[in-house]
Image: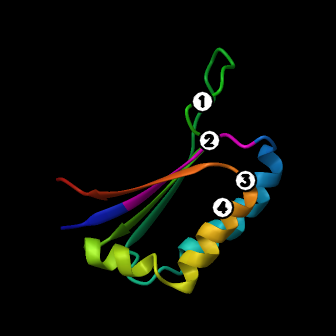
Amino acid sequence: MPTKITLIIDNPDEPAGFERVYAEVRSAAEKFPGLRRLESAKVWPKEDGTPTPAYRTLDLYFDSYEDASAAVATPAAGELFGGLLATGVPVTGLFSDIEA
């Protein structure tokens, strides 16, 4: 069954600095073996100015759970997760079966 990994990235204290690092992190994600599609999104700000529940999402699509699991054990994954962790911004990761 097709699987996606979703990374939900919290609000950084310094968005401009985070964006510089994120550009490199996104490039690392593109190197994941078996990656079928990548979606990167920036969460719209709330109209009332209160913090959003997340700052960005990154979705990585694979043909199967096994392919996704294998991809997160590669140097590209180390580069991606290491880069995100270095920012100090909390990240939540989810593996999901894609339902049609």
Taking 9 as reference, is 69 above or below it?
A: below
Q: Is residue 22 visible?
A: yes
Q: Which residue carries the number 3 mark?
A: 88
The amino acid at mark 2 is Tyr
- Is label 2 in contact with label 4 (beta carbons under 8 Å)? no
The amino acid at mark 4 is Leu
Q: Is residue 72 left or right of residue 65?
A: right
Q: Which residue carries the number 4 mark?
A: 84
- Is label 2 in contact with label 1 (beta carbons under 8 Å)? yes
Q: CA distance from mark 3 to mark 4?
A: 7 Å
Dominant secondary structure of the magenta stretch? strand
In percent of width and height, residue 17 lies at: 82, 53
The label number, if any, that marks residue 52 in the structure image: 1
In percent of width and height, residue 98 lies at: 24, 57
Task: State the SS at label 3.
Answer: loop
Task: State the SS at label 1.
Answer: loop
Q: Which span is picked out in magenta? A: 5-12
| Res 54 → quadrant | top right
Task: State the SS at label 4.
Answer: helix
Q: CA distance from mark 2 to mark 3?
A: 13 Å
Taking 9 as reference, is 77 above or below it?
A: below
